[in-house]
Amino acid sequence: MAKKRDGRAPGWSWQRGRAVALLCLLVAVLLVFPGLVPNTPGRVGSLLETFLPWLGLATPVLLVLALLRRSFLASALLLAPVAAWFALFRGMLFAGGQAPDGAFTVVQHNVSDVNPEPAATARALAGTDAGLIALEELTAPALPAFEEALATDYPHHATRGTVGLWSKYPLTGVRLVDIRPEGVGEGWNRGLRATARTPRGEVAVYVAHLPSVRIGATGLTSGRRDESAALLGEAIAAEPLDRVILLGDLNSTLDDRGLEPVSSLMTPPGPGFAFSWPAKLPVARIDQILTRSATVTRLRPLPATGSDHLPLVADIGL
């Protein structure tokens, strides 16, 4: 910090810290309008949207800079990103209240294709007493362990490729949902649809696992994920049943514009960040439980299993 000739530090001023003030405004604008960031090259826009809540961590850094510069201007404009963050995410700070009358519970979990303890994972999920359990990355060697562990409490189940649905309610109309991106072979099956005959009536249930994305030197590689999301959105848009539940590993957060073909058709869940990935230090919710003509009133993660994802459990009011 520069000092006056008499050795004293300069006082606070409205003239200093203009660069810091501009950074405060930039962070606020990016929080409110992340769509201004283009998605080419490297899908930087989607990358920002995926981790958008963490942009708030820029605020304490800007605060320190404003204090070091003794800037009234920067300190005042620091309120902009703070207000923007709380306007966007204040409702996510709490996990939600009690489940409403008639609500039932569903579980979503990417169990990992290298899970060393599938039977233990299945028992942990069964302990939730959920009405529906959706699983992704089911491998042929692990499938018998899940079938055996869940057979008693979940007499109805269906699998297609590497996704599966276990249910306490009868399942009808089970079919494959083709969400393969262009150029992917026929053995790649990651979507299914079924009708669950719940005590509250029939509900269309979709289970999906969209293609993975990678973050590298060139940015985010999400082209195939985005293409698969568009195909899933088309299937849901054509669904004749009014009530729909979508459970799946969508490989991004709902802020990501790449999921708009799906998220625009569905109701987002209630309060709670419910970060699900990576399991050891969750920083994003890329596993999703979404509804149409129903409401997710409470969404929360479960303790870690043998997977690199945390399970999610949701209470849904029909």
Image (cartoon, helix red, strand yellow):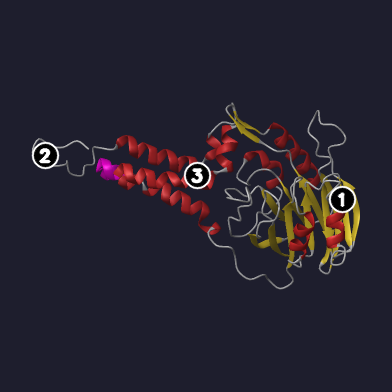
Q: What's the residue at 43%, 43% (across, down)?
A: 58
Q: Residue 246, relative to residue 222: is it above or below?
A: below
Q: What's the residue at 90%, 52% (across, down)?
A: 174
How many C-alpha atoms fall within 10 Å of the one at disc 2: few (<14), some, or many (≥20)?
Answer: few
In the shown orientation, is residue 269 left or right of residue 229? left
| Closer to viewer: mark 1 or mark 3 | 1
| Dot 3: element | helix
Q: What's the residue at 30%, 43% (across, down)?
A: 66
Q: Quadrant of residue 168?
A: bottom right
Q: Which residues are magenta?
A: 67-74
Residue hosting label 3: 32
Q: Quadrant of the N terminus?
A: top left
Residue 243 at least partly seen: no
Question: Marks 2 and 3, Cα distance to the nearest angstrom?
Answer: 43 Å
Question: Marks 1 and 3, Cα distance to the nearest angstrom?
Answer: 40 Å
Residue hosting label 1: 159
Residue hosting label 2: 7
Instruction: Give whichever of discs 1 and 3 has the lower sequence position.
Output: 3
| Closer to viewer: mark 2 or mark 3 | 2
Amino acid type at circle 1 is Thr
In the shown orientation, is residue 222 left or right of residue 19? right
Amino acid type at circle 3 is Val
Q: Quadrant of residue 156?
A: bottom right
